[in-house]
Amino acid sequence: MVYTGRFAPSPTGPLHFGSLLAALASYLDARSHKGRWLVRIEDLDPPREVKGATDNILSTLELFGLHWDGEVVRQSHRLNRYKDILTQLSSNGLAYPCNCSRQQIQRRSGSPRYDGYCRNHPPDADQLCAVRSRCENNYHFNDRILGLQDFKTQQEDFVIFRRDGFFAYQLAVTIDDAEQKISHIVRGADLLDSTPKQIHLQHQLGYQQPLYAHIPVATNTLGQKLSKQTFAPALDQNERVKLMIKALDFLGQQPLKTLADSTIEECLKWAVEHWDISRVPACLSIALEES
Ligand code: GLU
């Protein structure tokens, strides 16, 4: 099998330490397997997008020596493809329109979990609708870091096209991973719940299932994931080596003290040669000390 990995950031702001971890872990796993490493910009949600973020993310990756293969794919250029697949799923009866509001779902099922109402009560054709995937099965998979992931509860019929007219992440990411022939997905454990949804769509669409590895998410001392919302600072380009060492340490790679005096390229070379995924802590999150 040809190893192909990827980093798939959403352009909602500059890279921060949390996104560096996902970029670095996916890069190191790919390069240590002599594999390809692709970058895909997940710009599917214009209201959340920050102007200039894509260029900023790409130039930061380069400054950190994380050079990708081939062209950067932008999801905003692939909408016709998503539309075709959505039509295919709908005409095969594997997806259906739904106009339920969050409040209606909550009122009916006493929780935000969707109860499948529109399977049996199709909305009128002129209504603004989301599209949901019809789920019958549960999926389990073997995570390369976390081990067997068995989701006991029946999956709900989840949204693959949003009522506000945008394609949902679950659909786009599944199509792109398959069409880019991604063999290994390494990403943050905040996306663990998405994996059975994506496996479900892979089955419906006859795609091959990639191997998954979910790395712990970095949180602040309050246990909140580092993100724009929690004011995670952008990566300081003057501290590249220090940040890279901190990321390697977080990922359990036991970086040598002497790397502090190396260049970013030397540091990355060491990290590729010594990458050992079995040393990545098998947990969902780790709080960072204030520094
Ligand atoms: N675009 C997603 C994010 O930035 C990541 C998607 C993925 O790795 O599957 O959270």
Image (tube, rainbow, N blue to C red):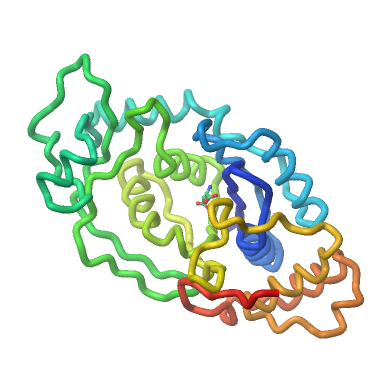
Q: Is residue 100 above or below residue 143?
A: above
Q: Residue visible at 26% across and 37% down?
A: 132
Q: Position of residue 188 (x, y in %)?
A: 52, 62
Q: Quadrant of the C terminus?
A: bottom right
Compared with 3, 91 (above or below) is above
Report the side of 258 relative to 15 (left or right): right
Residue 11 locus on image (x, y percent): 61, 41
In front: 71, or 7? 7
As drawn, is 278 to the left or to the right of 101?
right
- Residue at 38% x, 30% y is 85
Left or right relative to 9: residue 253: right
Instruction: Give the residue at x 23% y 45%.
Output: 157
* Picture residue at 12% right of the left edge, 45% below the top: 107
Q: Quadrant of the N terminus?
A: bottom right
Q: Image check: 177 left or right of 119? A: right
Q: Position of residue 202 (x, y in %)?
A: 37, 47
Count every numbered label the image shows and give the total. 0
Identify the image quadrant of residue 278. bottom right
Q: Quadrant of residue 104?
A: top left
Q: In the image as oriented, which residue stretches furthest toward the top?
A: 126
Q: Position of residue 233 (x, y in %)?
A: 68, 57
- Compared to residue 12, the image places residue 83 above or below, namely above
